[in-house]
Amino acid sequence: MSHSPADLLITGCTVLVHDDQERIAFAPDAAIVVRDGRIESVGGAAEVAATGPAAREHIDARGQVALPGLVNCHTHAPMVALRGLAEDLPTEEWFNDVVWPVESNLTEKDVELGARLACAEMIRAGVTCFADHYFSMDTVAAVVAECGIRAHLGEAYFSSQGPQGREKSLEFALRHRGTADGRITTALAPHAPYTVTDADLAATAELALEHGLPVHLHAAENRDQTDTSLARHGLTPIEVLDRAGLLATDLLIAHGTGIIDRDLPVLERASGRTAVATAPRGYLKFAWPDTTPIRALRALGIPVGLATDGAASNNSLDVWESMALTSLIQKSTEGDPRWLTSRQALHHATLQSARAVRLGDSIGSIAPGRRADIILVDLTGPHTQPVHDLAATLVHSARSADVRTTIVDGRVLMRDRELLTFDVPAVVRELEDRLPALVDRSHGRRIQEYDT
């Protein structure tokens, strides 16, 4: 251990740790030493106080729990600009009548302001990394670089854009991979099997393998899509991905509530590393009959990360809420109060979410050598006391507003609820000025047609 001052010392907190069996445990009265963006050590506060080290910055975290930063495994960050615009609608009308007409108005400035607001919202809610799938992603990458959050970014494309859509997605992924001091990773981002042709899906799989890039897309989002795909092609959306070669890549599938029993052997024999992102609030809102089959996927060893989708469907980028809802909806769906437990929910929110975005070796747990993506949660409020079961308190009693401090790569982005890298009122004012032009649908255009 170096004797020069550490960059950051956090003392007095209880730390969520993973044992060698990946079970959740809690270490009380701990100290975390951070140096050069990484966690140098996690030990007893008394022992660290006795032996040093001095630190440039010290946080006294008594009464708080240190967790790995949460990961939003699938979202469309700039869509916060459309929060609450398309309410109480079935999926098809939501896309065709509101969202896709409005998105035909999007400018780079709208994307920038939406991304700023989204990153501010996520940092305040303890999200330290997000996987984004959208347009004008150069703009989103610039916001990420400036504000200090971590992100896994993909430039979305439809086959209706012609070959340049796919080429732009590749060019973005190669140019931004490893930027923002390594905080940005990238993926190829075809929209979905119902908007991207088999030929484009197959070409994407080849490009992913050739360039060592993962792929992030929507598939089997709901049961209607699966039924329509079976009727039209005799294949489920998962089987369509398999035929295109995408299950041989590192693949992140958004939603998957339409994954059915016949898909499970296909996923099990896949040669690539598949992960699924679940965003349960939106499924409730759209009245979809099913949710992500987490139990079946976990039995195959497929990590399921937590997500919010975009704020146009979810109204929120609150992964904390996704964690609680995932636990509750899984209990209800499976008819089993023992699944998913609070500890399992915390595992999905930490290590599994990190794996879903291909960062399982660097984030997702608080341990020496990991990147210092840490959040401090205040449990002194009346709604979180007394604590009989700390995991249950975190998942079912605490809220994202109890996150006091958010740290990414050892840099404090929010301290005592104060954002340090954003001027939120200025962003909101500028966005409000642009809203009339953004939400105008009188032109009759839409960027795509939803027909599943």
Image (tube, rainbow, N blue to C red):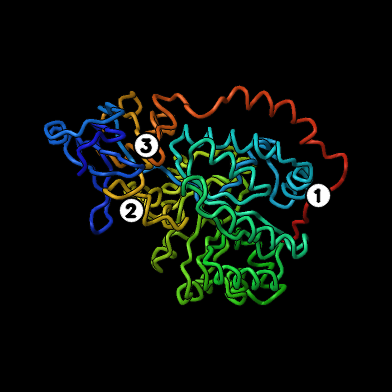
Give the SS element for disc 2.
loop
Nearest the viewer among 400 and 179 is: 179
Residue 226, compared with residue 415, is above or below; it is: below
Label 2 CA crowd tier, 10 Å (few <14, some 14–19, many 20+): few
Quarter occupied by the C terminus: bottom right
Residue type at mark 1 is Arg
Q: Quadrant of residue 30?
A: top left
Classed neighbour count for the residue bearing mark 1: other residues with Cα under 10 Å, few (<14), some (14–19), many (≥20): some
**Image quadrant in which you'd find residue 218:** bottom right
Q: Which residue is mark 3?
A: 375
Measuring from the top left, give residue 416's x and y in whole percent.
Answer: 39, 24
Assign a secondary structure to mark 1.
Answer: loop
Count of residue discs: 3
Relative side of 165 to 390, left or right = right
* Residue 103, image x, y percentages: 75, 44
Residue 446 numbered tag: 1
Q: Nearer the viewer, residue 402 or 158?
A: 158
Q: Earlier in the sequence, mark 2 or mark 3?
A: 2
Quadrant where the N terminus is found in the figure: top left
